[in-house]
Image (cartoon, rainbow, N blue to C red):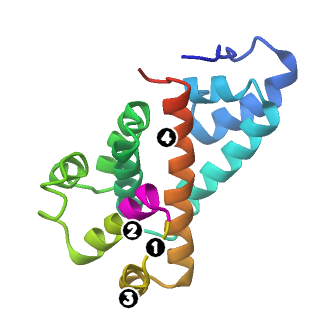
Amino acid sequence: MRINPILPGTQPELAEIEASIAAQRGRVSPLYQVLLNSPPMAKGWEQLLTAVRNHNSLPAYLRELVILRVAVLNRAVYEYEAHLPIALKAGATQAQVDAMRDPAQLGAGLNEIEQTLLSLTDVMTRNIEVPASLYEQVRRHLDERQTVDLMVTIGAYNMVSRFLVALELGH
């Protein structure tokens, strides 16, 4: 870990934000302990990621498969391990989860919408630009809100995973 974490309860001026994070997440994880080095970033991060996780119009298992795929693509072990039990609890199967890690299996056992959303995840993570044909495939399955929620989820978890990897959290 490249930045020292701030242990909860050690800085009274952070009590309010720590309480907010704990209320949303159940605890102040090592990720948030590092983010607390910049209270405005920790607060904004918590608000964005809470919206992505708790107010997303996508089915929870699809959201979590997308998050797992971003984590795999960006080699964010911490993020993958954090979201694996969430994905399984949300209804993703072990076969679907396993497919996120193995490009040869990525199409196997996934239905058309799952394949399409994961193709978008791969393209947005690796290439950024989304071809019109792929966007049209996504729109055949999702309405406007779901499309925005999907793209924000992919973008947000690219932010999360890149932050984690750059600061060597979870290595």
Considering only order in the chain, which callout, 3 or 4, is on the residue closer to the N terminus?
A: 3
Q: CA distance from mark 1 to mark 2?
A: 7 Å
Name the foreground residue: 133 vs 82: 133
Residue occupying image coordinates x 65% and y 23%: 33
Quadrant housing the N terminus: top right
Q: Residue at x 54, y 30 (%)?
A: 166
Q: Amino acid at mark 1?
A: Val
In the image, is 11 to the left or to the right of 75?
right
- Real-space Cα separation, disc 4 to disc 3, in angstroms: 29 Å
Cβ–Cβ under 8 Å for marks 4 and 3 = no
Residue 99 is situated, as x and y percent measured from the top left of the image, at: 19, 52
Q: Nearer the viewer, mark 4 or mark 3?
A: 4
Position of 49 relative to 75 (above/below): below
Q: Position of residue 86 (x, y in %)?
A: 38, 45
Give the class, few, some or many, for how many residues have Cα within 10 Å of label 4's Cα (few <14, many ≥20): many
Residue underneath mark 2:
120
In the image, farthest residue toward the right: 13
Looking at the rendered structure, the kind of residue marked 4 is Ser
Disc ID at residue 130: 1
Q: Which residues are magenta?
A: 121-128
Query: Are circles 2 and 4 on residues that touch, CB within 8 Å?
Result: no
Q: Which badge, 3 or 2, comes first in the chain's sequence?
A: 2
> Sequence-wise, which precedes: disc 4 or disc 1?
1
Query: Would you say 74 lies left or right of 128 here?
Result: left
SS for tag 4?
A: helix
**Residue designated by label 4:** 161
User: Helix or strand or loop: what does disc 2 sit on?
Assistant: helix
| Residue 71 found in image quarter | top left
**Residue 140's disc number:** 3
The verdict on residue 135 being magenta is: no
Q: Is residue 56 visible?
A: no
Of badges 3 and 1, the one in the foreground is 1
